[in-house]
């Protein structure tokens, strides 16, 4: 069997690094043919040097170091140029933010499957992505742990028989605090996720529950399930990664350690399962407790927004994500407080013009305007 040629966007990040680990565990099955990153050029260079199969490299700006004998793209359009110029079988989109949508669409238009970590592609552009998938006969494989769990639980069954998808939420860094206590929290505390080691943006999104709101929207577009059939339950151990309840009340769950290597590998090897080296695989023969608690929408108001975005669609997902991206940056740089992230999102949604059937260009404009709005709001 010929190795699957992988083009990896966001190679220097949390998902990117773990994707390379999975690829390196199975050199006979995968070949890394292209990588892109933002600003960590030294880290990217080390990846390129240790993977001679890499032919194409993308960076956010012109690098100061020499990348040698590869095709190099930088600046605006670097990821799309890598997609255009590289011969690959599967795109792994592990870049963060709205910038991930354009390469997702470009790969689909090229007729190449996508293993998707970049949930923003679906939050901001779910309608466009699904139209493009259908038009090009291309598949999307979820990497997000909850969606991988649901995908695994759906194997052998039809989504027509699904009573509901049950997405688990850890509750994030502040799950033991009430809203009054949230007024005083620090950036450092917010970045201390109880279970997962992830990039900064998604870690803050877990604490605000924006991540879970995004995951509700992501599930709607990935599995074509109406919003009434998508629920969220608090599960502080992050062992049950999500569940599918069927019409006969059978509930299928996927359990595992808090390690993204399994969902990444499954997206790369589907429908096969390969051996995987994890540091601490889950051992269910040891005693453990699994807690489940109903979602509290007063404590976590961001969850409700997900259902409004699914109902009204249009450019609301792009505004939701754009406002959050900007607000998280302002919070990380100490310019606004934790609760002001929520306020940024609510105000941006209230003050932005609604577009019912946006093009990609209109989504990009809505994203930009939501960011500008948040910057102005706090200036
Ligand atoms: N981490 C996790 O466990 C999970 C993550 N996800 C999703 O996966 C995606 C990636 O998350 P995560 O790995 O945590 O994020 P990280 O912040 O760790 O990594 C982000 C990647 O995107 C790159 N990047 C940043 N800015 C740019 C830019 N301007 N142009 C091109 N590339 C850029 C970064 O490059 P550089 O660092 O070189 O600047 C880095 O390689 C997100 O959408 C997230 O929601 C989903 C589930 C779990
Ligand atoms: C690993 C992963 O998929 C993250 O999205 C994770 O689920 C975050 O956890 P919570 O948002 O449940 O805190
Ligand atoms: Mn997740």
Image (tube, rainbow, N blue to C red):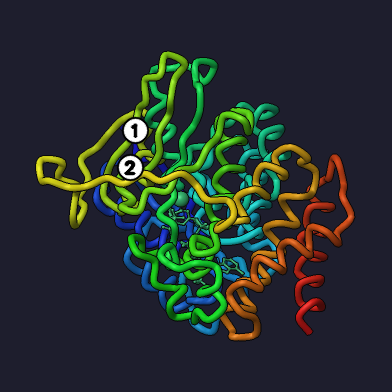
Residue 226's place in the image compared with 56, above or below, is above
Label 2 crowd (10 A; few <14 / some 14-19 / many >=20): many
Tell me residue 275's x, y (percent): 20, 40
Please identify the quarter of the rendering in which residue 3 is found.
Answer: top left
Asked whether residue 13 appears in the rendered view, the answer is: no
Label 1 crowd (10 A; few <14 / some 14-19 / many >=20): some
- What is the spatial separation of the Cα atoms under label 1 and label 2, in whole angstroms? 6 Å
First in sequence, mark 1 or 2: give its number. Answer: 2
Asked whether residue 33 appears in the rendered view, the answer is: yes
Which residue corresponds to the image point at 19% horizontal and 57% vertical from the top-left?
Answer: 279
Q: Nearer the viewer, residue 298 or 55?
A: 298
Tell me residue 278's x, y (percent): 21, 52
Residue 29's place in the image compared with 318, above or below, is above
Are dots 1 and 2 in contact, CB under 8 Å?
yes
Residue 349's place in the image compared with 309, above or below, is below
Q: Mark 1 falls on what kind of element?
A: strand
Q: Which residue is mark 2?
A: 240
Q: Mark 2 falls on what kind of element?
A: strand
Q: Would you say 350 lies left or right of 129 here?
A: right
Q: Nearer the viewer, residue 213 or 39?
A: 213
Q: Would you say 268 lies left or right of 346 here?
A: left
Tell me residue 377's x, y (percent): 80, 76
Q: Which residue is mark 1?
A: 253
Residue 361's place in the image compared with 96, above or below, is above
Q: Nearer the viewer, residue 368 or 160?
A: 160
């Amino acid at each position: 069997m010929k190795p699957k040629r992988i083009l990896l966007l966001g190679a220097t990040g949390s998902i990117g690094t773990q994707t390379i680990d999975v690829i390196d565990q199975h050199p006979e099955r995968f070949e890394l043919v292209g990588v892109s990153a933002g600003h960590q050029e030294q880290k990217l260079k080390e990846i390129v040097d240790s993977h001679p199969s890499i032919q194409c490299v993308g960076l956010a700006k012109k690098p100061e170091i020499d990348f040698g004998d590869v095709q190099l793209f930088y600046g605006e359009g670097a990821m799309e140029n890598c997609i255009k110029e590289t011969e690959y079988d599967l795109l792994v989109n592990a870049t963060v933010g709205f910038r991930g949508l354009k390469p997702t669409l470009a790969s689909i238009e090229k007729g190449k499957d996508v293993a998707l970590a970049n949930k923003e592609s679906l939050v901001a552009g779910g309608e466009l992505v699904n139209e493009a998938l259908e038009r090009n006969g291309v598949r999307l494989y979820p990497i997000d742990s909850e969606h991988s769990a649901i995908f695994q639980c759906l194997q052998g069954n039809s989504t027509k028989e699904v009573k509901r998808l049950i997405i688990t939420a850890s509750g994030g860094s502040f799950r033991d605090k009430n809203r009054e206590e949230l007024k005083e929290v620090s950036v450092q505390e917010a970045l201390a996720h109880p279970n997962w080691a992830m990039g900064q943006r998604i870690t803050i999104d877990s604490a605000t529950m924006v991540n879970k709101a995004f995951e509700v929207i992501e599930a709607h577009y990935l599995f074509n399930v109406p919003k009434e059939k998508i629920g969220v339950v608090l599960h502080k151990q992050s062992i049950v990664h999500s569940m599918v309840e069927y019409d006969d009340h059978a509930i299928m769950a996927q359990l595992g350690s808090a390690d993204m290597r399994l969902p990444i590998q499954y997206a790369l090897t589907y429908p096969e399962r390969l051996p995987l080296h994890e540091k601490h695989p889950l051992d269910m023969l040891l005693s453990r407790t699994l807690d489940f608690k109903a979602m509290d929408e007063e404590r976590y108001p961001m969850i409700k927004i997900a259902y409004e975005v699914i109902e009204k669609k249009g450019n609301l997902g792009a505004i939701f994500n754009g406002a959050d991206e900007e607000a998280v940056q302002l919070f990380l740089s100490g310019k606004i407080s934790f609760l002001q992230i929520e306020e940024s999102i609510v105000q941006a949604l209230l003050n932005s013009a609604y577009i019912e059937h946006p093009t990609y260009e209109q989504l990009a404009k809505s994203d930009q305007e939501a960011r500008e709005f948040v910057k102005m709001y706090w200036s």
